[in-house]
Image (cartoon, helix red, strand yellow):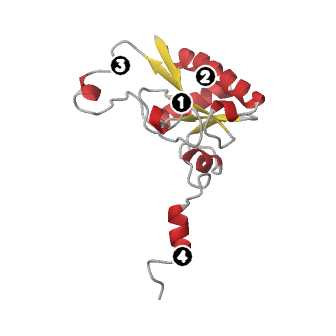
Amino acid sequence: METLWSPWRMKYMMNPDPVQDCIFCKALREEDGPENLIVLRRNHAFVILNRYPYTTGHIMVVPYAHVDSIEALTPEARAELMDLMAEMMVLLRDLYQPQAFNIGANIGKAAGAGVAGHVHMHVVPRWSGDTNFMSTIGETRVLPEELEVTYRRIRERLAR
């Protein structure tokens, strides 16, 4: 009979594998589709829908390299990150006609990074009035489109 405590379990609990447990690295190991939400892969980075979006079309541009900061990336990966952000802005502008964008990164836990170990950039389409009483008072986000529909629409537009 195996006990709940073992040296191996204690070692794992104390030192989890940051790459194995990373949501971005896990998604990369899966086949692209509505389950992993990856809409595009390039040489050094990929684009994935945010599973908990602020608005419809909220995507993240993520380098393949599991590093915690932009300056740790190769120049090629940094350049591709920026190119993909611009490409996604054009695509999202065409697809959803947003009035503006929020673009940024939370680098480090103190900055609010949800995945502090794997740097990533957010591209968030914005419209006047997209933040209302539901998110402010009700702590609930209202999205006019389901993630699977957003995934399909972006993939279809990329295929053109």
Q: Quadrant of residue 45?
A: top right
Residue at image mark 3: 130
Q: Is the Cβ of the residue at disc 3 closer than 8 Å to that at disc 2? A: no
Expressed as whole percent of the image width and height from the top left, the position of residue 97 reads 49, 13
Q: Is the Cβ of the residue at disc 1 closer than 8 Å to that at disc 3? A: no
Query: Is disc 1 surrounded by few (<14), some (14 to 19) or many (20+) residues within 10 Å?
Result: many
Above or below — where is 93 with respect to 155? Answer: above
Query: Is disc 3 surrounded by few (<14), some (14 to 19) or many (20+) residues within 10 Å?
Result: some
- Residue type beneath disc 2: Met
Q: Nearer the viewer, residue 102 or 47?
A: 102
Task: Locate the C terminus and report the quarter of the image it occupies.
Answer: top right
Q: Mark 3 or mark 4: name the one nearer the start of the chain.
A: 4
Residue at image mark 4: 7
Q: Is residue 21 left or right of residue 74?
A: left
Q: Residue at x 49, y 26 (%)?
A: 57
Expressed as whole percent of the image width and height from the top left, the position of residue 38 reads 60, 39
Secondary structure under tag 3 reads loop
Q: Viewer-nearest of labels 1 and 4?
A: 4
Expressed as whole percent of the image width and height from the top left, the position of residue 158 reads 65, 27
Above or below — where is 83 with respect to 39? Answer: above
Q: Report, in whole angstroms, how far the alpha carbon at label 3 lies from the one at label 2.
A: 20 Å
Q: Mark 1 or mark 4: name the one nearer the start of the chain.
A: 4
Residue at image mark 2: 88
Expressed as whole percent of the image width and height from the top left, the position of residue 66 reads 65, 43
Q: Quadrant of residue 69?
A: top right
Instruction: Please give the label number shown on residue 59.
Output: 1
Q: Residue at x 33, y 15 (%)?
A: 129
